[in-house]
Amino acid sequence: MKAPDFVYERASTLEDAFRLKAKHGDLARWLAGGQSLLAALAFRLSEPTALIDISRIDSLKGITRSDAMVRIGAGTTQARIGASALICQHVPLLAEAIPLIAHTAIRNRGTIGGSLAFADPAAELPACCVALEATLIAQGPKGERKIAARDFFEGVYATALADDELLTAIDIPIVQSGERQVLVELTRRSGDYAMAGIAAVVRREAGKISHARLTYFALGDRPVAASAAEKSLLGRTLDGDAIDAAVRAALGDIDPSGDLNGGPATKRHLAQVVLERALKRIMTDAAQTAA
Amino acid sequence: MTTTAINSNAITVIVNGERVSRQVPARQHLIDFLRTDLGLMGSHVACEHGVCGACTVRVDGMIVRGCLVLAASLDGSKVETIEGVSDTGEIRDLQDAFIARNAAQCGYCTPAMLLTAADLLAHNPNPSREEIREHLSGNYCRCTGYQAIVDAVETTAKARK
Ligand SMILES: Cc1cc2nc3c(=O)[nH]c(=O)nc-3n(C[C@H](O)[C@H](O)[C@H](O)COP(=O)(O)OP(=O)(O)OC[C@H]3O[C@@H](n4cnc5c(N)ncnc54)[C@H](O)[C@@H]3O)c2cc1C
Ligand code: FES
Ligand code: FES
């Protein structure tokens, strides 16, 4: 369980990072918190020739708000995000997701950029970013580009990032009035990756659902939008009938293959359970607000 | 015979209050640096991929997995292990409670349990049993069944009030 030999380099600025990447070439990897990469290296799942440590690049860290957007630096740790008052107030979905990721000792080092770039299909943050309609900002030697979260994830551990690109920040629209953000997942033990989960963002205007983003995780090779379920909710009052219809519609949105946690039939059942729980929570909260 | 040079980096770290400068292999984990190079055997290592928590130590005041941190990345950092926090007496009461409640059997998980429990009590002086279990959930114990450990942490929290 020892990692293969590699060169360790530390970048102090983005320019430094791109220079080191050019120097070490294709088999060099970015090292952020190391909470997925170093575990993978221990198994020798990959054998990079160099690790370029980006964890001390200050410009990649921090959480700021501008108008309708919260920007999170890609190098911000999961622990920082979980403890942020800005996040708690403006992006409650992330505040709910963070404590479900691994354990404190891992969240103290693991970063949001690392979670997104690693793109584990069972991870919480990729699904949250899709449900929140976040924009991911990538930078490479040739400049910056913006990628919608829904276009970023391309498969198991696969993203739209080019080999020499870095994720620098994530822009997330702040929660609007009438909107509820809820995350529900099922795990065997606290801190495990989910067996099935959903990130749900539902907005209502004058009692009718005007916006619904329901994104599954651990139910496909990437975050999966439950588009038919979303559509079935639009224009309706959120009641038991609407929830039943959405849960039925969602079965058409997923085609899970089995994994260590169960076969496709189990996964489909769990998908219904998490969606129903998420929507029921939103319905109950809404009732409380109205009262 | 040919030998391949192992890549290495120079680091200076403060370990339990003492300044240490060493040349470390690039791929060396913090836990192996502490145990093998510095002889600090109080931190344990088992799974080596982040799952069991036995290697928990503090870096710059925060608990981390010693098997998921490269020693080479720590230049300028402050590292604390069970040896250090035992010497300062910071967790004397917690250690006494572990003994009183029989919360250590083989002891393999204990140093990491203590550091993780200390981290909880530092951030949440009045945790429920549920919160104690949640905070310790990333630290495996194959002996105690956890009940005694939760008891010890709860007792310490109450006594500190
Ligand atoms: C025991 C255990 C349990 C876990 N449980 C969960 C869980 O329940 N849910 C969950 O979501 N995660 C879980 N994780 C993973 C954890 O969240 C990782 O922290 C995270 O996936 C990776 O973040 P990192 O900063 O450590 O990235 P690293 O491990 O440093 O890097 C991961 C990958 O991303 C690339 N990368 C990192 N940063 C960037 C960037 N800015 N731009 C481009 N590429 C980049 C790296 O090159 C590497 O390929 C768990 C990990 C462990 C060890
Ligand atoms: S040895 Fe580090 S978590 Fe198991
Ligand atoms: S006391 Fe033996 S593993 Fe915990």
Image (cartoon, rainbow, N blue to C red):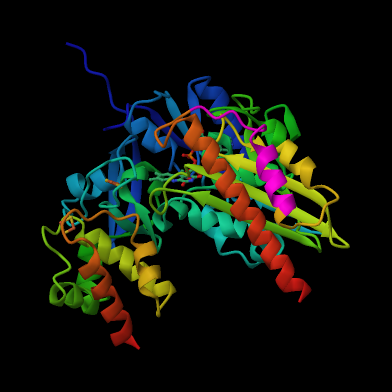
- The answer to whether one can see residue A119 in this image is yes
Residue B117 screen position, x and y as percent: 32, 68
Which residue lies at the image location 59% right of the left edge and 29% below the top edge?
A: A19
Question: Most extreme residue toward the front, as rendered?
Answer: A241
Quarter occupied by the N terminus of chain A: top left
User: Is A250 in the magenta?
Assistant: yes
Relative depth, front residue between B83 and A80: A80
Out of A287 and A13, give the one closest to the viewer: A287
The outermost residue toward the right is A206
Apparent side of residue B40 relative to residue A262 in the rendered image (left or right): left
Residue at the top extreme, as displayed: B1
Give the residue drawn at x 63%, y 35%. Answer: A251
Query: Looking at the picture, how far across and down is residue B69, in whole percent?
Result: 37, 45
Relative to A26, residue A17 above or below: below
- Residue reaching furthest to the left: B106
Q: Position of residue B43 (x, y in %)?
A: 22, 54
Quadrant of residue B106 within the rendered picture:
bottom left
Specify the segment rendered in magenta. Answer: A241-257
The answer to which image quadrant residue A151 occupies is top right
Asked if residue A13 lies in the magenta stretch, the reply is: no
Q: Is residue A118 left or right of residue B32?
A: right
Q: Nearer the viewer, residue A1 or A238?
A: A238
